[in-house]
Image (tube, grey):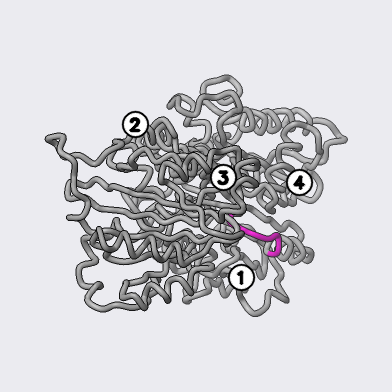
Amino acid sequence: MANPDRTTKYAKEVLAGNIVAGQLVIKACRRHMEDIKKSKRKDFVFKFDLDRAERAISFFDFLKHTKGEWAGQTVKLELWQCFIVGSIFGWVHKKTGLRRFRTAYTQVARKNGKSTMLAGIGLYGLLADGEPGAEIYSAATKKDQARIIFDEAKNMVKSSPDIRELIDLFQRNMSVATTVSKFEPLSADVNSMDGLNIHYGLIDELHAHKTREMWDVLETATGARQQPLIWTITTAGYNRFSICYEQYSYCLNILDGLVEDDTYFCYIAQLDKDDDWRDPACWIKANPNLGVSKKLDDLERKCSKAKELPAAQNTFLCKELDMWVSQTERWMDLDKWNDCPEEAVDENGEVIDLAGYPCYIGLDLSSTTDMTSVNLEFPLEDGRYAVISHSFIPEERVLEKEKRDKVPYSAWEKQGYITFTPGEVVDYEWVKSYILNQAAKYQVVEIDFDPWNATQLANDLAGEGFECVQIRQGFATLSEPTNDIMSLVLQKKLIHFNNPVLTWAIGNSVVTQDPAGNIKLDKSKTTFRIDPAAALVTSHTRARLRENNTSVYEKRGMRSLL
């Protein structure tokens, strides 16, 4: 019985419109079909070998899933995966029979089976590619990331009896004695990467690579092989100056016909420019495994969040719809912010006495010539939070700042939202005095501060008997409170007393994201001041944990939040 041609079947179905796909996938399929026509010409040196394509695809029949709902079941490639695997292994040189494609770039959204496919490819290279002394590496900048593909492949071997007896398993190595071949994780943080002789270099999530070091190492270490393969499977990212975006851009030129590189395979599944990202009918373009490993209800939930939270839109577009986006985005929808209560009243409309509730004070001390902000935050017993924000500006800088920032600092000072301190710099004694006055009215639990430029003031306040907590300014510390504030605003559970300075700062605030989608405010990406907003995040970092903080106030002094 003749082999089915699953590679070409996918291309035909996409081009016929029977499979929904984005324009870049359509171009990849068109390239395949046009190359089949060109292969009949003498001047085109490559041909599509169906047997070799199906041999690589069928290799997955020997592998079993190791995680989730399919654990223990045989790996069955979806048709889009057959197109990728079949293309890379089916296209060969007419005379030598060596593989045509030496580099492969595959970009799809999260949870579309990327690691499973790449782990299986690694095992194919180790066992079935006919390469004596094959060296297969799963490569990343960090050891833990490099082990993801390797560990997945290792678990496949353990659960797949047909291949288990062929491979020797060690903690950081899989090897085949009969061919002297090996499969290992490779990371840039090892002592040396000299002496590599790479047959396959497999890179998972290239977007996370901050430098091109690993890519360059892999490229230069393949020179002794007849048909080496560097294959990356990634989602889109945020950094347009990265090695990943460089390869992505190169693929765009290939698929658009601007660059001719017959050795480079490209498959990029993402939304098209004019698609409405809120339309579920478009999502399959970035998620070819939608309904299989990628669940529609999960996408619907994340889309609903992205519709409400401006900062969540970038994460949804980038990681779920595979679009390269800017790393910064406006933090808050001001319409939602303005919908929040302006006064702290109970269900009966009575004014709440905040003196009866714990108070967390957040400090943001920027340059002494700029704005310094203090935020008092009160967790109420019904899940709401009330915040009182106050800021300080050096008096002799006010006119300069009003002209530059085009905001009414003088009016805000008269309304009581800002204090002008004498001189050209913020006098922190005035900040200290303000805090002491508030502590006389409210039950101050602790003072939370950004350690930059605030150590002396924190020491002074600790000397006054306050518990002072240093809030680290990394993504790990700030992402959850930043997201939680947005959630409170959407639920109208943040009472901000219509403070115009705080509202102005909220409108100025943008968030930056790390590769994992964690967020924090980014002062460097905004022209105007965001200090009151930063002080709010600082206080909320601790105020939101109030139920777990009962015992830590038994002693006074300075502490660091790890």
Q: In this view, does 399 lie above or below 368?
A: above
Secondary structure beneath dot 4 equals: loop
How many angstroms separate mark 1 from mark 3 (CA)? 45 Å
Residue 387 point in image, percent of width and height: 33, 48
| Tag shown at residue 328 | 3
Query: Quick one: label 1, few (<14), some, or many (20+) residues within 10 Å?
Result: many
Residue at x 78% of width, y 40% of height = 46
Q: Can residue 520 be seen in this view?
A: no
| Tag shown at residue 484 | none
| Residue marked by disc 1 | 181
How many angstroms separate mark 2 from mark 3 (CA)? 24 Å
Q: What range is drawn magenta here?
A: 208-213
Residue 285 counted in the magenta span: no
Q: Is residue 108 above or below residue 390?
A: above
Q: Which amino acid does label 2 sit on?
A: Asp
How many angstroms separate mark 4 from mark 2 (CA)? 56 Å
Q: What residue type is labelled 1?
A: Ser
Residue at x 39% of width, y 38% of height = 302
